[in-house]
Amino acid sequence: MIDKDVVKLLSDLSLTMFSKNFFGIYHGAISTKLDQNNFIINTSDAIFDKMEDKSFCTLNVNKRDYRWNIASIESHIHATIYTNIHEAKYIAFGMPIHTTAYTLEHDNIVFEDFFGKTIFKELPIYNPGDFSTWYKRNALEITKYLKESEHKIMVIKGIGTYIYDRDILELVKKIAILENSCRLLSIKSSFQ
């Protein structure tokens, strides 16, 4: 049985991130580490604006059982991150519209607004290369990148954003600042 407080926290945050377009209806993943070997993640059929107990499952990073079949397609990436980045307590993956659109035409995000500049200054955009092999390579590439990242965030060209943190509120704050900053950059470019 999954802890009700954890479900409520992840459900509430999922709704918030869904309403801000970080998650799509079936697109995205959110998880929390329970202990060294176990984590909770959304299921593959989770609808992010209506999360409940059955929208989550508990997985063991060392034992692949039947639950892995119902878990998010991103589960193997979350497991690899939790195994290799011990400070990761929460992980989210989403496809925020303005951020992802910005990646299609740029190689870096150079922040110009106060919050973006204060928190990030500049973020590189990771080019995943061949999309057809991405799901074979992504767990290791994402984990390696995040391990070396100063901001615990990875913006991937045409795919989305991975982020982890020990503090869920910091994670959500960084997502909001990133997306709002990219939205402002998009609006700015329409004036030119």
Image: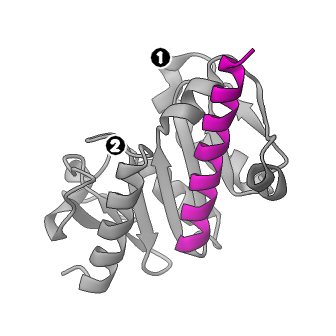
The answer to which quarter of the image holds residue 54 is bottom left
Q: Secondary structure at mark 1?
A: helix
The answer to which quarter of the image holds residue 128 is top right
Q: Secondary structure at mark 2?
A: loop
Q: Position of residue 131 (x, y in %)?
A: 51, 19
Distance of label 1 from label 2 (alpha carbons): 16 Å
Q: Residue at x 51, y 60 (%)?
A: 91
Q: Is any atom of residue 10 visible in this view? A: yes
The correct choice, above or below, for 9 with respect to 29 in the image is below
Circle 1 sits on which residue? 132
Instruction: Determine if the magenta segment contains residue 185.
Output: yes
Q: Residue at x 36, y 50 (%)?
A: 18
Q: Are marks 1 and 2 in contact (CB under 8 Å)?
A: no
Q: Residue at x 78, y 58 (%)?
A: 119
What is the tally of numbered marks visible in this picture? 2
Q: Which residues are magenta?
A: 168-192
Quarter occupied by the C terminus:
top right
Q: Position of residue 73 (x, y in %)?
A: 34, 43
Q: Is any atom of residue 61 visible in this view? A: no
Q: Amino acid at mark 2?
A: Ile
Horizontal placement of 116 versus 130: left or right? right
Instruction: Determine if the magenta segment contains residue 92.
Output: no
